[in-house]
Amino acid sequence: MKTLLYCCHSWRINNWLGLARAGVFTRPLTCPPLDAGSFPYSKLAGVDLVYMALHGAAYERDLLYGDDWRAALSIEALRRRAPDMSGAVVVLEGCYGMRTRFPHLFRALGAAAVIASARPTWDRTLSLGRAGRYGSTLVRALRQGATVRDAMAVAADVVDADTAMAFVLAGEPDVGVRRTTP
């Protein structure tokens, strides 16, 4: 499963750990040093899974943030520079991702599904908190062939109801992750 991980620099260990526990080994891209202007949008091409653990804010619809509230991703840059993302599954693990315009834009770029939170999510820096356990379990289930809907149900079984209910689906619930690489 070709995966792109983009997260706050301070969360790189926790997010790498969560994906590694799910059987996905990828080098995280982080903000900083990257930001909304320097993020390599072309790397979204041909990706099966996009996993983003960035800060969102209840009042901000067009930006996701990295450490020190540096703009990590912007709607405008994504709209101008992103490639076709046909078939990808996007997970926005950070707070308020579903309240932003990112789920709609990722879908318009071809993503089959976007899983994001409409509320705050909680994780840890060096180990897996509730959001990290949810994400890790979700990715493991997707790798094992579960549909997005089923993967969300499996992940809900491993975290408290409040965390599980925070995550919402935009897109096709009965699609799975395409398999371009082992």
Image (cartoon, rainbow, N blue to C red):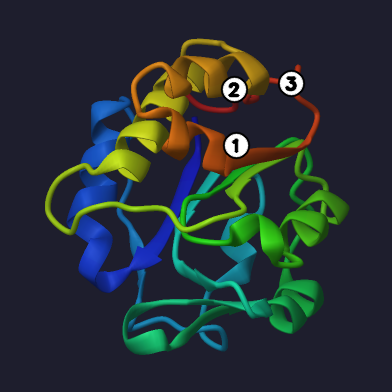
Specify the amino acid type for callout 3: Val
Mark linked to residue 110: none
Residue type, label 1: Asp
The residue under label 1 is: 48
Query: Residue 179, labelled with which disc?
Result: 2
In what element is the residue under mark 3?
Answer: loop
- Residue 25 visible: no
Where residue 77 appears, as percent x and y from the top left, is 71, 81
Q: Is residue 38 above or below residue 57?
A: below
The answer to which of marks 3 and 1 sits earlier in the sequence is 1
Q: Are marks 2 and 3 in contact (CB under 8 Å)?
A: no
As helix, strand or loop, the secondary structure at mark 2 comes to loop
Callout 1 touching callout 2 (CB < 8 Å): yes
Q: What residue type is labelled 2?
A: Arg
Mark 1, Cα crowd under 10 Å, few <14 / some 14-19 / many 20+, is: many
**Position in image of residue 117 (x %, y %):** 57, 50
* Residue at x 44%, y 28% (from the top left corner): 161
Q: Residue 175 carries which label?
A: 3
